[in-house]
Amino acid sequence: MYNDNIKTLKIVIIAAVVIGIIAASAYVLYGFSLFWATFAAGITIGLLLIFIVLLLILLIYLWIRMLLLKREIKRLEIKLEQVNMELSRCRSRQKISDREE
């Protein structure tokens, strides 16, 4: 009877050790997979943040360029109006000189 209990106890201990080893290896693999998933997520978020910052820089650059172009267009419109006025004066002078001849 005593030998049967020791035999059963040995079987239970061996089964517990095997289950413990399987559980420990599963825990280690799961822990590593969580580590790598976290690492990959961190890299992905970092790359996305860099991309967002680059897009913001591009947006600010294009906005400033648009403002400068609007300013240039306004200046050229004023110059065009002056040239049109000068052209109309020259045409009127030309018509007057043609009539006199």
Image (spheres, rainbow, N blue to C red):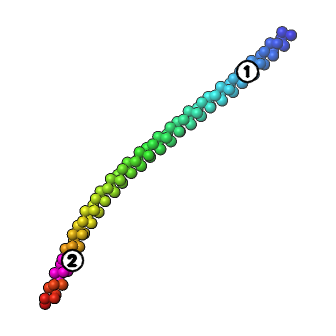
| Image spot of residue 84 (x, y percent) | 23, 73
Pointer 1: what residue?
A: 16
Let me know if residue 93 is in the magenta part: yes
Look at 18% across and 78% down and name the residue there.
Answer: 90
Look at 21% across and 76% down and name the residue there.
Answer: 87
| Image spot of residue 83 (x, y percent) | 21, 71
Amino acid at pointer 2: Ser
Locate the N terminus by quadrant: top right
Residue, far right: 1
Look at 25% across and 69% down and name the residue there.
Answer: 80
Secondary structure mostly seen in magenta is helix
Label 2 vs label 1: CA separation? 105 Å
Pointer 2: what residue?
A: 88
Residue, far left: 100
Circles 2, 1 touching at the beta carbon (< 8 Å):
no
Mark 2 or mark 1: which comes first in sequence? 1
Q: Secondary structure at mark 1?
A: helix
For mark 2, does the 10 Å Cα neighbourhood hold few (<14), some (14 to 19), or many (20 or more) residues?
Answer: few
Q: Nearer the viewer, residue 76 or 55?
A: 76
Q: Secondary structure at mark 2?
A: helix
Let me know if residue 7 is in the magenta part: no
- Which segment is the magenta one? 87-94
Q: Nearer the viewer, mark 2 or mark 1?
A: 2
Answer with left or right where residue 5 lies relative to residue 45. right
